[in-house]
Image: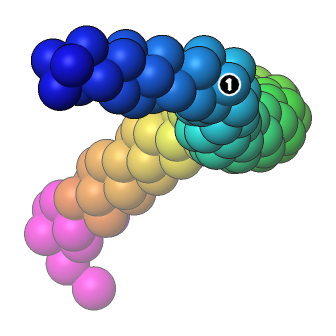
Amino acid sequence: MPKASQKIADNVLLLAIARVSMVLALPTIGVLFWLYTQWQDTRLNSVQSQIVDAQRSASDASDKATKVSDRLYVVETKQTQDAASSEKFQNATLTRLDRVQDSIVGLSNAVAALTATLQGVVEDRKVKPP
């Protein structure tokens, strides 16, 4: 009979372990699922914070691009105005230089005429004694 009682005891112990494992299976699965969802929430929060940072950076870059675009427009406008002003100044300077050159030619002709007149006066004095 010891064998029969041993078989019964083994069966009862085995049956008790089976029943306990069935009872604990659902809570264990629930705990594992809860831990997994917590881990996923942590990862999701991390990804969301990265997305918020990326959106903030993109917004800042967009604002800076708008400011750069406005500045570029101002610089191009100023450059166009300065080019027109520079061209006017160059034309006015060339006109003045042409006038100065004409004046120099006129003065040179006047000096040549004056020199010729003085040479004529000197020749007249040489020819006519006083």
Residue farthest bottom in this picture? 130
Left or right: 122 in relation to 118 = left
Can residue 110 be seen in the rendering of this structure?
no
Can residue 56 be seen in the rendering of this structure?
yes
Residue farthest front in this picture? 1
Labels in figure, total: 1
* The N terminus lies in quadrant: top left
Residue at 37% x, 55% y: name it.
Answer: 111
Part of the protein shown in magenta: 121-130
Residue at 27% x, 85% y: name it.
Answer: 130
As drawn, 125 above or below 78: below
Q: Position of residue 36 (x, y in %)?
A: 59, 30
Q: Which residue is mark 1?
A: 23
Three-letter amino acid code at the position of disc 1: Val
Secondary element type, mark 1 = helix
Residue at 51% x, 26% y: name it.
Answer: 16
Left or right: 109 in relation to 112 = right
Q: Position of residue 59 (x, y in %)?
A: 82, 36
Relative depth, front residue between 54 and 35 = 35
